[in-house]
Amino acid sequence: MNRIKYLISLICLLGLVGFAASALGAGTEFGGDNEIIIQFSSPVDKVEAADPERYIVFEESDPDIRLRITSIEVADDGREAKLIFADPLNTSNTHVVNTSDIGGAAEASFSVSKSYLGYLISILISALLINNFVFTKYLGLCVFFGTAKRKETAKGMGVVFTIVIVVAVSMSWVIFQYILKPFQLDYLQIVIFIGLTSLTVQAVDTVLRKVNPVLFKSFGVYLVLVIANCVIIAVPLLMASNGYNYFETFMLSLGAGGGFLLALYLMSSVSERVELAKVPPSFKGLPIAFIVAGQFAMAFLGFSGLQLF
Amino acid sequence: MANENSSIQLVTNGILKENPIFKLALSMCPAVGISTTVMNGVMLGIAVLFVQVFSSVTISLLKNFIHPRIRIPTYTLTIATWVTVIDLTLAAYFPAAYAQMGIFVKIIVAFAIITMRLEMFACKEPVTASFWDGLGMGLGFLLGMVVIGFVRELLGSGAILGYDVLGFKPLLFFILPSAGFFVVGLMMGFFNWIEAFYAERKKG
């Protein structure tokens, strides 16, 4: 029962976000690559609404850069206008549309943005596939090639890594946001972030050993390797340089961990097959693993244009 | 024993017998990620050399004061301190090269090779030996990066150190980011082949 309640409230939240309109407007959304659709609450004069001179559109972060409108299509009932722009819009940024003398209102302002949840999910998908840390950013390779030989090890390493990175990056975010930034200690980033990671690893090690010795026996060996993985330091650094808030940080770390797990699992599936194949003796082991990884990297390039939200 | 630990032997050990990139296969991320030009390789190689030498010396000096239970976090924090030093230095004096290397300078902190050398060598051996070992490992890494960068730059853009030498671009593919995996894989295979070839000749 509780779950359904959550789901409903989530859907309501989804509907509310991105719906910020004034008395004149009922709603706004992005159409195609270069379109913004505005719905009016009451019918407006078609000639007025079709005049590009009456609209001023800009990205919220750059109010001085006006976006050029090529044409405007107004629906027959006068309740909807579609603004078509000369250049494709950067739909991940919030856009502001100001109108003047339309529908009797002297001034009206609309803001257009994608729903926040969609934005968060796009960060997750991006870290998972489009900017996969192993195949498109070339990080964490030492541990990757070391543990991608058996599916079992791949799964163990991936899961342990995901847990540690989410916990460690969450702590890094708190320290960065409330200690490093206010006191301008940015140059301590590397020391603090890697120190927190060591601490997390040590803590997980101790807790797991006491709480669940069986789990520790199968996963404990991977804990040491986590600290030697470049991704674990790259994610907090990215978080700091992008100025992410907590939800964005959480999604980024989850995507990084999940992406590593995915890469490990894919690679280990191939490695198990390669062992049975006839490989030239001088290419056995690491060299062939590198070439397989190169092919994966090229395949992952295919995700680069992916845009879900 | 004294002969085995001579400084020259320690340095060549890092460059040839235990080359961090081609033999130990550690610290592969930069070897794949930013080895598109010789210059990148030289810059990052120098950064790693610096961090390796200074961390080795620091740990070797402090080895009697470090409790064995917390030795790994101590190593990590030592490395992080030296990485911060080189990171700020490069950003201040070589901003163009630093921008090209991006996040990779900061990531030296997680390089397995440095921690491994501290654990295997510097925490047991005297200061001078640790210095030479660190120098050898750093030079080995530098050499590996330069070799990969040389191959990729020459074949990919027909240039060396930015100067056009061939006048044409033989295989543009090599300059693409994902080709790093192929280049490293092929070179490792090639070195294995040479080794096997000489071992065979020595025998017969």
Image (cartoon, coloured by chain):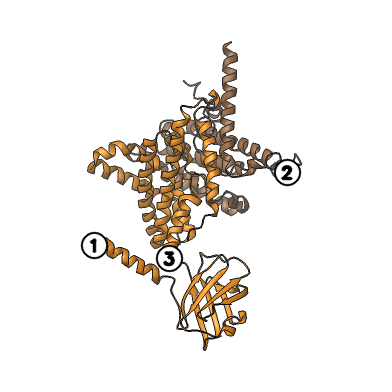
List the single residue furthest toward the top.
B204
* Chain B pictured colour: brown
Helix, strand or loop status at disc 1? loop
Query: Chain in orange?
Result: A
Identify residue type, mark 1.
Met
Residue A216 on image: x %, y %: 28, 39
| Left or right of residue B30, residue B169 in this image | right
Q: Which residue is mark 3?
A: A116
Q: Residues within 10 Å of mark 3 (few under 14, many from 20)?
A: some
Helix, strand or loop status at disc 3? helix
Question: For the residues carrying marks 3 and 1, which lies nearer the camera in this image?
Answer: 1
Q: Which residue is mark 1?
A: A1
Say which quarter of the image contains residue A161. Answer: top left
Identify residue type, mark 2.
Tyr
The residue sitting at 26% across, 40% down in the picture is A209
Q: Residues within 10 Å of mark 2 (few under 14, many from 20)?
A: few
Distance from the alpha carbon under mark 2 to that under mark 3 = 48 Å
The residue sitting at 59% across, 40% down in the picture is B179
Q: Which residue is mark 2?
A: B163
